[in-house]
Image: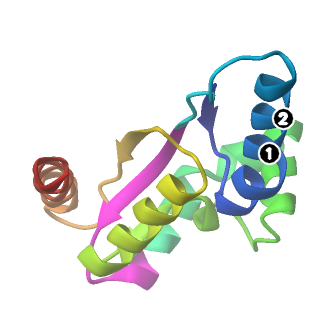
Amino acid sequence: TILWMAGLRTIEHHIAPKLRRAARKAGRPEPRIVAGMHIALTAQKDAAREKVGKVLAIYRQMPSYRAMVEIEAAEGSPALALVGDEKELDAGLDRLRDLGVSDFEASRVATDEGAEERTLQYLEAREKRG
């Protein structure tokens, strides 16, 4: 299952349990879950969240994505992105893994100068660490 704009709460309480239950019932292996999310490595978190909110504003007008925002109990779409320093991104990605996400599809966001390249370097280094 490939997700887009589904946050941690949605994955934890709605998507992953239902997929696992259906797989068990059908005698199938643990399902692969791909979480597609925006991500930005930045020290300017507030400005980055504001930028992500502007980038994702269109999704608030679409019922299925608006539902994701409501499930997340968020003020808006920025809560559906991973934004922050290495420690915060590690925590978010680790949490996704703990929820059963097998793959992460990163959509890097140019939240500030150099953010896309920094984020790519971070993700490459994390991949090497395993």
Whether residue 62 can be seen here? no
Instruction: Tell me where residue 37 appears, x and y as whole percent.
Output: 50, 47
Quadrant for residue 77, please give it: bottom right
Q: Which type of secondary structure does the marked residue at label 1 adopt? A: helix
What is the distance, in whole Å, between disc 1 and disc 2 at their CAs?
A: 6 Å
Q: Disc number at residue 21? A: 2
The secondary structure type at the circle numbered 2 is helix
Q: Magenta span covers which residues?
A: 35-47
Decide if residue 65 is in sight here.
Answer: yes
Q: Is residue 12 magenta?
A: no
Which residue in the structure is indicated by mark 1?
17
Dot 1: within a 10 Å radius of its alpha carbon, few (fewer than 14), some, or many (20 or more) residues? some
Which label is found at residue 60?
Answer: none
- The residue at 77%/50% (across/down) is 60
Which quadrant, please, contains the N terminus?
top right
> Residue 88: x, y in percent?
37, 78
Q: Residue at 48% of width from left, 53% of height from top?
A: 97
Image position, residue 93 (x, y; %): 42, 60
In this image, 77 relative to 124: left or right?
A: right
128 relative position to 24: left or right: left
Q: Residue at x 10, y 55 (%)?
A: 125
The answer to whether the residues at label 1 and label 2 have Cβ atoms under 8 Å apart is: yes
Residue 119 sits above or below residue 14 on the image:
below
Q: Is residue 104 above or below residue 82?
A: above
Looking at the image, which is closer to me, 58 or 43?
43
